[in-house]
Structures are given as structure tokens and as C-alpha cells.
Image (cartoon, coloured by chain):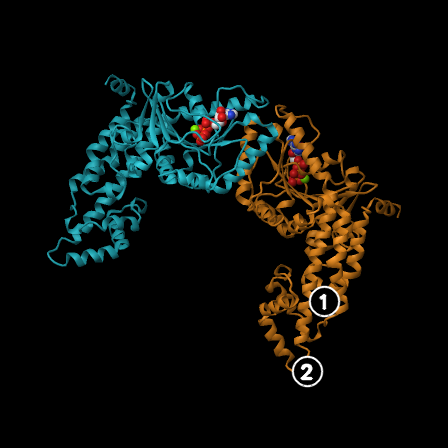
Chain colours: A orange, B cyan
Amino acid sequence: KLERVCRDCFAPAESALDSLKRLYARKIAPVEKLYHFASFYTPTLMDGDFDSKPMVLLLGQYSVGKTTFIRYLLEQDFPSARIGVEPTTDKFTAVMHGHEDRVIPGNALSVQKDKPFYGLNMFGTGFLNRFEASECSAPLLKEITLVDTPGVLSGEKQRINRNYDFPAVTSWFVEKCDLILLMFDANKLDVSDEFKSVLQTLRGHEDKVRVVLNKCDTITPQQLLRVYGALMWYLGKVITTPEVMRVYVGSFWDKPLVRSENRELFEKEEADLLRDLSELPRYSAVRKLNDVVRRARQARVHAHIIAHLKAQCSGMFGKQKMQRKLMDDMPNVFNKVRLEGKFAVGDFPPVKKFKEVLESYEFSKLPKMDQQLLDEMERVLSKDLGDIMKLMAPPKESGGEEDEE
Amino acid sequence: KLERVCRDCFAPAESALDSLKRLYARKIAPVEKLYHFASFYTPTLMDGDFDSKPMVLLLGQYSVGKTTFIRYLLEQDFPSARIGVEPTTDKFTAVMHGHEDRVIPGNALSVQKDKPFYGLNMFGTGFLNRFEASECSAPLLKEITLVDTPGVLSGEKQRINRNYDFPAVTSWFVEKCDLILLMFDANKLDVSDEFKSVLQTLRGHEDKVRVVLNKCDTITPQQLLRVYGALMWYLGKVITTPEVMRVYVGSFWDKPLVRSENRELFEKEEADLLRDLSELPRYSAVRKLNDVVRRARQARVHAHIIAHLKAQCSGMFGKQKMQRKLMDDMPNVFNKVRLEGKFAVGDFPPVKKFKEVLESYEFSKLPKMDQQLLDEMERVLSKDLGDIMKLMAPPKESGGEEDEE
Ligand SMILES: Nc1ncnc2c1ncn2[C@@H]1O[C@H](COP(=O)(O)OP(=O)(O)OP(=O)(O)O)[C@@H](O)[C@H]1O
Ligand SMILES: Nc1ncnc2c1ncn2[C@@H]1O[C@H](COP(=O)(O)OP(=O)(O)OP(=O)(O)O)[C@@H](O)[C@H]1O
Ligand SMILES: [Mg+2]
Ligand SMILES: [Mg+2]
């Protein structure tokens, strides 16, 4: 109990985020609920989704030094951490703040609505058995949560030992996280096929990705140049955005450097990486607001589509036939709704996925238009969310919202 | 006259290359001549094509330091060299060995059969006015020829001032050269559209390309890391081969370093680059042999195609009709010739280009099969060229020929 209370004290209590949470629960969630939004998109946001600290995801082949890196950032051990030359970490581990060291297993975690892992339920116990939270009192964890992952192995070996869809799970975390650290070992750059598919999951989230080239002190400066160049060459090919990805080079642990020619460079790189991490809490709030805005816009469009379908099927006869007709004509339905409401194309769901879910509904029993509810949400979109944004970002830094879009 | 004689003394007199030259002139050139090979492919090889020294082509945007780099390699000035912050070099300049400093203008150069520039005639005087040789007595020039080029400017400015097709000319040099140095300035990596089209001309010759990142001493090691990374990222995108291109970083002139943190690295890089250049004469001979082999294989196939067409049109009547039929059926003709002679697909010309040239011939007047001539060339291909290869590359390094293919 005591533990619980204390943890709450350390939860980020930014008033802007609290307003956002209240606004969502009172004005947006009801629309989502009425029109079954969660079945078509993702589960309704929980308190945990707002209160959670910025999350940093560590990805990389096995033994590149992910767990060691977390230990180094925390300046202490964390429960369940295992470090070794062989593949060691075998679970997704959320390293979080807690006043005592303890490990919370995945199944227990996934039912806690005050934690941001509720959505992981969809991957079943096959995954939840391989997921845990590791709590300890390292000060950094008051600011951010770090997610350690099992290293990616070479193809076959990997798939045999796993009871869950690794790329799909990774994709969930990629979506949810504020920063993704892609770690490589300067001594062996080889990239397995599975790691390539992990790189694919980053598509659309390139702005969140930073690369860490680790163990750079074990090779000569000239070798480092070659390895780093090969990494950039490779990344330039697989990452489709023209913006160059930031790569931090160095040796990220507490042991002294093996070769010290690049000491100054490594120190600067490390300072830059830490600055990058320290700016997360500020951007994280904006990112959450951004997610809510996107969600509200989608919910608005979704409500209009559903209400439209309902209206078409509310006559006395021929409901079945009408439903089939509408199903076949969905692109046109979308188009009509879009023109009527002057909505943006981007706020509409993919037709195929939408129809798949709709399959199980009887159109005549869908909820009809609730104008008051929608009007209220409209006001949230056109005014309230903008006000919260102002609280988050000082005026001189305006434009940040658009950058995040 | 004296000058001329002296220059001849310094010509590469490797006996293997001499044998190759003789073999080509006596056994391959006659086949080419009989079957009009030069009209369909490229001009018959001249002495200059065999005697010429390995050529190194310098490419890059303006003011990156190309001319300065050549001056630095030579450890002396060369006639017509101009160096400056504005676009300065306005000609293609072949920097070659000569006992006295002198400049030979392009038109004069292009008629000298002992120089490898005979083929440049096809670009007309518009280009030849912008081409010259600069001779001086720097010892390095006894081993290699360096080709300085005008820096690539940003689009419009460029095209207005030119009377020739820059990418086409570049392409000719790319084909002819043994090594291509692509130079960038660490202070400004921007790449113009025209430079992108120059990069396109490198396709298929990636193994000859080295990149030089110049003026690296003017920025901090951390900035250098970023610039170098961005360059690799960019090159990885535009160069389609998976093999990472070798980049030499440093400051390639005789002035002291502005920042010395990376002195040791720059020195090693420079040593590597010089080693790369010093190995050129050895590889150049192999490359020439390789070109002759490819040419002989194409000439063989070409002779069979021509003789086949002739045979089909040697009846008394209906020659015109038969010619039209064969023209329309060229892919089939190729196929027949290929199966009959067991030739490789790669030795055949592109159908379209072949037909374009053939347009102006009357098939019945084409030369017929000269079995003796072809048999002799066959022996060259199956034995003599292999013997020369053995002279060029010591046995332990065999396999080099295939690598070059
Ligand atoms: N900066 C470093 N320099 C040199 N060696 C390091 C460095 N960081 C970690 N190591 C070593 O690399 C090995 C792997 O470390 P670690 O277990 O942290 O990697 P990991 O990426 O978490 O691996 P896995 O994916 O198997 O969990 C260990 O032997 C560790 O001591
Ligand atoms: N290694 C170097 N470090 C710093 N400055 C350099 C270096 N090499 C050349 N420069 C300077 O850069 C400028 C351009 O040099 P240079 O004329 O050799 O370039 P270029 O590539 O030949 O240009 P252009 O394409 O116009 O002929 C000159 O002012 C020169 O002094
Ligand atoms: Mg680990
Ligand atoms: Mg120049």
C-alpha cells in the first residue's frame, strides 16, 4: 500500500497532462464508446496511457550491450538484469521506478490500468510469459521508463524458441515509445534477417529512432571509421527517409576505454545522447496530446460513418439487402461521409480492415447520430486541445505541434 | 623530336602488354575490320590504348580541391593548373608525363594515335576546345595519368556555359579510366542535380570508384563524424551495389592541418590512398587484357551474326524481301547463331542498337564467313590470352581475372 502511494507521488503531475486526461475521459471516450471505436481501432486509453513516463525502447542483435547500457544509465543494477556474452535477456523488460526492487510478471502487468501495458493483452499469454516489469529506485527512472528487449538472433534458432510474434510485439512498442535506441556492436555489424524485419517496423517512426554504435573503444580509429561508414551506408539503404539518422558512437558502460584516441569524441557523443534522453519528458507530453488529437479526429469520422450506415438501414424492410449493398459500396460510403462533413482523407480507416470488423455487426442495430455528443467533441478539437498545447509548449516554440504531426 | 624520343623511353614497356598489343593487331583487329565491328561497337584499339598509363579520373563539385589534390600528388605545379575559391578549372585536363612543361590543346590531342584520346573525337570540337593535356616531368606521372575535370556547378549556370554533353563525356572517361576519385568537401556536402547525373554514369563501374572526403581538418572530430556519416548515408542510397564504397578522409594538400586531433587517422588514410594508387599499374595491365578478351568475344559473335545474315541473302532472287524479314526477326537470328555456336548471351549486342547500325547495310554485300580468320582468333581466345594473363599475374594471385570480369 505504502509503496503504491509513494509511486503515485512520483507520477508526472503536469497539470496540462491532467487536463488532457480529463478532457479525453469526459468528451472523447464517450463518443468512442457509443460507436464501438475500440473494436475498429485500438483499446480506449487508460489512465496509464496518460500517466506513464516517456518510454525508451532498446533494440538490437544479441550481446550488443543493451542490458549493460541500461545498467550504466541507472548507475546501478536492476532486478532480473542478466548480462553475458551469450544471448542473455530472454524477456521484454520494462525497467520502471519503484521504491523497492521487485519484478512484476507480465500477466499481472497487463491488467493494471494505471500502467501503459494494457494493450499487450492482445498478444496472449505466449507473450505475457516473456514480459515483465523490473522496478528499482534509480533516480533516472523517475523521469523515463526503459524497455529492455531480447537480442535478435539469427533466423531459425530464434523462431523455434518463441511463442509469440516478435515483429508484431516490437511494432506495438515502437508505436508506444517516445524514443527508440537501435544498438549495434562495432565489432560485429552483421544484420540477421529477423533484425531486418525489426527495422521494417520502424517505418513511419523514423523521427523517434536514434542509433547507438557501441563498444567503439575496442577498435582503432580507422577501423571505427570503416565500421561506422558501413553502418551508415547500410542504414541509408534500408531506411527510406532522406533525413540522416543520428548515430551516437562510444562505449556505453562504466569500464575504462580500451583505446583512448577518441576519448574526447566519445565523451561528447555520450553527453549528446544524455541530453537527447533528458529532453524526452517535454516532448512526451506533446506526443500524448498529438495522439489524442489524432484519435479524436478518427473517432469523429468513425462516428459519422457508423451513423450514416445506421440511417441507411433504418427503414422497415430490406435491411439485409441494404446492408449487403452498403458493404459492397464502402469506398463510396466513405466518400459521401467525407464530402458531407468536409473531413480529411487521412482521418478515414483503411476500407478493408474496417469492413472486416463491421462484418459482425447488424447495421440496423448500430447507434444513431448523437449530435450533442459530437458537438461537444468538436469543441474539444477546435479549442480545448489547442489551449492545452499552449500550456505544454511556450509560445516561442510554437510550430512544435506541426513538427510532431 | 628529342622530347618525343625521351617520352617513348618512359612508356610502359611491359612485355606482356606488348604481346597483347601484337596479338590484338594481328589476330583480332583483322576480324573486327572484315566485319565492320567498329561501326557497331567502338573504334578499333590504337597503340595509345595499350601504351597509355593507368588513368585516374577526378570528379567532384567545384572547389572541393581536385586541382589542389593533383598538385599535391605531383609535389609540383603543372602547366595550366588554376586553383581558387571560385569555379576555376574550366577544362578536362589530362595531366601526363613530359620532360618539359607544355600544354597540348584538345583538337591536337584527339588525332594522336599514340594517346588514348582518339575516341573523344565523337564529342566534336565543342568538347575538344575544352580539353587539353598538361605535360610536366613529375615522377609520379611516369606511372599514372591524372585527369582533372571542371567542378560540377549547380544546374542552370552550368548548362548555359557548356557546348558539350558533360555526363556523356564523363561517361567516356569513366569507362576508360582505371580509378575514379569522387571528391567531396567536408565543409559543404550539398549535391547538385548535375552531380547526381554524374553519379549515375558510375553505374557498372562501382569497383573502380573511391571517394575522397577532403578538408576534414577544418572541422571538429564530432562534426567530421556527422558529415562522413551523412555522406555514407547518401551514397548508400544512390549507389545500388551492396559493397560499401571506400572513403578516404583527410586533407589532401601540403598545408599544415588546421585541427590536429585526427592527425594520425588522416596520415593512415593518406597512406592507404597512395597505396591504392601505386597498385594501379599492376591492375591496369590486367584490365586492358580483360577489355581485349571481352572485345574478342564480342567480335567473334559479331562475325557469326554478319556471316549468317550474308548466307541467308546470297540466293539469286528475293534478297530485299529476305533482308526485311531478317531485320524484323533479329531476336530469332541471334538465338539461332547463339545455339549454333554455343555462345554466351552476354557476348551479344543489344538488338535495338545493332539493328540501327545494320539499317545502312545491304545484307547481300556483307562479308561471308572467313573460317581461317575466325579459327585463328579462336586460338587466341582459348590459349594465347591465357598465357599473357599468366605473365601479368603470378599464379598465387590467380582468380584476379574473374574478379575483374
Ligand atoms: N561498452 C561495452 N564495451 C565492451 N563490452 C561490452 C560493452 N557493453 C557490454 N559489453 C559486453 O557485451 C556482452 C553483452 O552484453 P549485454 O548482455 O548487456 O548485451 P545485450 O545486448 O543485453 O545482450 P542480449 O540481447 O543477449 O540480452 C557482455 O559480455 C558485456 O560485458
Ligand atoms: N585540403 C584542403 N583544405 C583546405 N582548403 C583546400 C584544400 N584543398 C584545396 N583547398 C582550397 O579550396 C579551393 C578550391 O581548390 P581547387 O581549385 O583545387 O578546387 P577544384 O575542385 O579544383 O575546383 P574547380 O572545380 O573549380 O576546379 C582553393 O581555395 C584551395 O586553396
Ligand atoms: Mg540483454
Ligand atoms: Mg580545379
Per the image, label 1 sits on a secondary structure element best described as: loop
Name the amino acid, label 2.
Answer: Met
Q: Residue A81 appears at what percent x and percent y?
A: 73, 39
Q: Is residue A58 above or below residue A336?
A: above
Q: Which residue is at 65% across, 76% downward?
A: A312
CB at mark 2 closer than 8 A to ligand 1? no
Question: Which of the four quarters of the rendered structure image does ligand 3 lie in?
Answer: top right
Q: Which mark is residue A128?
A: none
In depth, the one of A234 and B76 nearer the eye is: B76
Q: Is residue A209 above or below residue B187?
A: below
Q: Which mark is residue A35?
A: 1
Q: Residue furthest right?
A: A2
In depth, the one of B20 and A269 nearer the eye is: A269
In depth, the one of B140 and A177 nearer the eye is: B140
Q: Residue B64 appears at what percent x and percent y?
A: 48, 30
Specify the quadrant that holds the C terminus of chain B.
top left
Q: Which residue is mark 2?
A: A316
How far apart marks 1 and 2 lie (CA) works out to: 22 Å
Mark 1, chain letter?
A
Q: Residue A189 appears at what percent x and percent y?
A: 56, 37
Q: Is residue A195 above or below residue B139?
A: below
- Pointer 2 local density, CA inside 10 Å: few below 14, some 14–19, many at least 20: few
